[in-house]
Structure formats: C-alpha cells, structure tokens
Amino acid sequence: MSFPVHRLRRLRRSEAVRSMVRETNLSVDDLILPLFVTFGKRVRRPIGSMPGHYQLSVDNLVREVKKVQGLGIPAVILFGIPEKKDDIGSGAYDPGGIIQRAVKAVKDKCPEMVVITDVCMCEYTSHGHCGILTGGEVDNDSTLELLSKEALSHVEAGADMVAPSDMMDGRVAAIRDVLDRNNFHNIPIMSYAAKYASAFYGPFREAAESVPRFGDRRAYQMDPANKREAMREVALDIEEGADIVMVKPALPYLDVIRSVKDEFAHPLAAYNVSGEFAMIKAAGAMGWMDEERAMMESLLSIKRAGADMIITYFAGEAAKML
Ligand code: PBG
C-alpha cells in the first residue's frame, strides 16, 4: 500500500516531531579540535586560508584550550611548527620540542582535556616529506624508528593519545612496541589508517608550513580511486594494534567511512580536513551559501556515514550551536 495511506510528510510537520524521528544526532562529544602551536611568546598569527584559526605560541595555546574546554569539547589534536627544520626532522622527537612543551603546558593547566598529538615528520623536515629521504625517496623502514621516538617523546610529555599520520607501512606496530616497552601500554593509538593523497590538505600545509619542497605525497598516501585498498590499510592497522582508525579526508570519502564502519568493529574517526573547512568558509564569506547550515549539514553527513568522532576546524563553532 502506498499513497494516500503513506504520507512521509506527516512526520516532517514540526521541529518537535522531526526531532523524534531523527536518525542521526551530532553531539559535542563527537568533536575533536585541531590546534597549531608555534615557538615564541604571545603569538597569535592568523592562518589566511582558515579564518578563525591561528598559529599559537604555548601561552596562547593554553588559553585557547581553556576556552575549548568551556565549550564542552572533549579533545584536541596538536600540530607543531618548530623553530628549525632539518633533513631528519630532529625537532619531532626533541624532548624540549614544540609539541612536547605544548603538551606539558596544556596537561598542566587543563588535565581533563584529552590531548592527542599528530605523529609525523613533515612539519619538522626541511624537505617537507613525512619521512627520511634516501636517494630522493621516502624510506619506510628508517622512518619507523624516528616516528617511534617521536610518539614516545609525546607520551613522555603527557599526551593521552598519539595519532600517526605519515602513512609509512608498519608504523602502528613500531609505535605500539616502543610504547609498551616503556610502560605506556595504556596509551591508545589513533591511526590515520586510510589517508588519501588529497588536494584538500592545501590550507593545512600553509598552516603547518609543511608543503613538500619537491614532488608530492603520492608514493605514500593513498590513491583517491581506491576503496578496497582502504579496507586493507584499516585491517593491517587494526592487526598492528590501532585502537581507533581514521578515514581522511571526510566529505569526498563518505563511502569509505561507511564501508569501514560496516566491516570493522573499531571506533572510527573521520578528519574533516582544512580544504573542506576553507570551501565552506569561502562560500560563506562570498554570501553564496549559509555557512552555519552548510557546516552542520557536513558534520551530520560524516556522522551519518558512520564516523564515531570527527576531527574538525568547525568544532568550536559547532559546539556553540549544539
Ligand atoms: C601530516 C598531516 C596532514 C594533515 C594532517 N596531518 C597534511 C598532509 O598530509 O600533508 C592534513 C590536515 C588537514 O588538511 O586539515 N602529514
């Protein structure tokens, strides 16, 4: 039996009824805010392509995290911009490095905040690649050692969780091993399991000053055309000990998010990346789209696709509306 017995509009007539039959709900608990931390004092340098976001020195970062906590956002993920870069990204695993100092300061002042650190070499290497170069290529196995050192130094500084984003093979196992050997068996790993070589990282690379000096990241990040390969990446990271797996970017890969959700029981994160943020901001600024509605609709779609948590530059603005 169909029309006129069935009329789907009956349940759309008021906001109260719509809210009763709503299948997906976004909550502030789902949100993780990325923050950029840089050297110096009293620095709050606007990021041109990401309105409302800044490179913050540690003092201002702590202030920002307090505000974020006030909004009810449970977690932040930190990205560091070091004072000096070199071939082997020494700043990444320096115990006195930018992230290590930032984590200590934040955990000291806001112990309740879940502090996640991005583990990668690209912000710390002079060539801007996510690992060590040998003969012009990013060398997988020698990079693992540095990533492990980096993860350990973040955790020693007080990080609650580490998130490797480099896309080297075997990094989750290497990091799990070093953490366990140092008695950090209770620190979870959130792995950027299916991370695609995406144009949507453009604004981030300005923000984190991590544009590769030559070539691109296609020899380690995934081909946007592949979904079965994403399932293999996720399966391997889970086997290696990932506690949370991630799909990144989010909006152009909602199908991948859904498939990972259907296939695996692991908690799933999605990264609503800088380009996804910048597009909505730009269209909003031009008056071409209602920015707030576009933001909420995007976040909801990521949740509906199957993400349990969303890393998003909209976290602050969305939290105010939830
Ligand atoms: C580091 C890293 C990147 C992002 C998160 N971690 C950039 C990249 O791979 O170049 C992108 C985040 C964003 O665009 O918001 N490797």
Image (cartoon, rainbow, N blue to C red):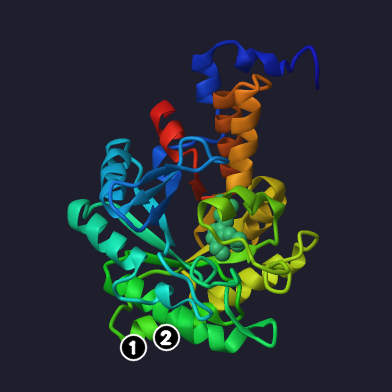
Furthest-left residue in this view: 108
Q: Which residue is drawn at 54% across and 40% down?
A: 48
Q: In this view, does 34 lie above or below 179?
A: above
Name the kind of residue labelled 2 in the image. Answer: Asp
Q: Which residue is drawn at 59% across and 67% down?
A: 193
Residue nearest the viewer, comparing 155 with 101: 101
Q: Where is residue 37 in the image (x, y as percent from the top left)?
A: 38, 55
- Which quadrant does ligand 1 occupy? bottom right
- In the rendered structure, the answer to whether residue 49 lies left or right of residue 39 reads right
Q: Mark 1 points at which residue?
A: 181
Q: In this view, does 318 lie above or below 229?
A: above
Q: Where is residue 26 in the image (x, y as percent from the top left)?
A: 48, 36
Residue nearest the viewer, comparing 93 with 244: 93
Q: Name the residue under label 2.
A: 177
Q: Is mark 2 on a helix, strand or loop?
A: helix
Q: In which quarter of the image is the N terminus?
A: top right
Q: Is residue 103 above or below residue 274?
A: below
Q: In which quarter of the image is the C terminus?
A: top left
Q: Position of residue 75 (x, y in %)?
A: 36, 51
- In the rendered structure, the answer to whether residue 240 lies left or right of residue 151 reads right
Tag 1–tag 2 contact (CB < 8 Å): yes
Q: In which quarter of the image is residue 50?
A: top right
- In the rendered structure, the answer to whether residue 37 lies left or right of residue 297 reads left
Q: Is mark 1 on a helix, strand or loop?
A: helix
User: Can you see residue 286?
Assistant: yes
Q: Residue at x 38, y 51 (%)?
A: 76
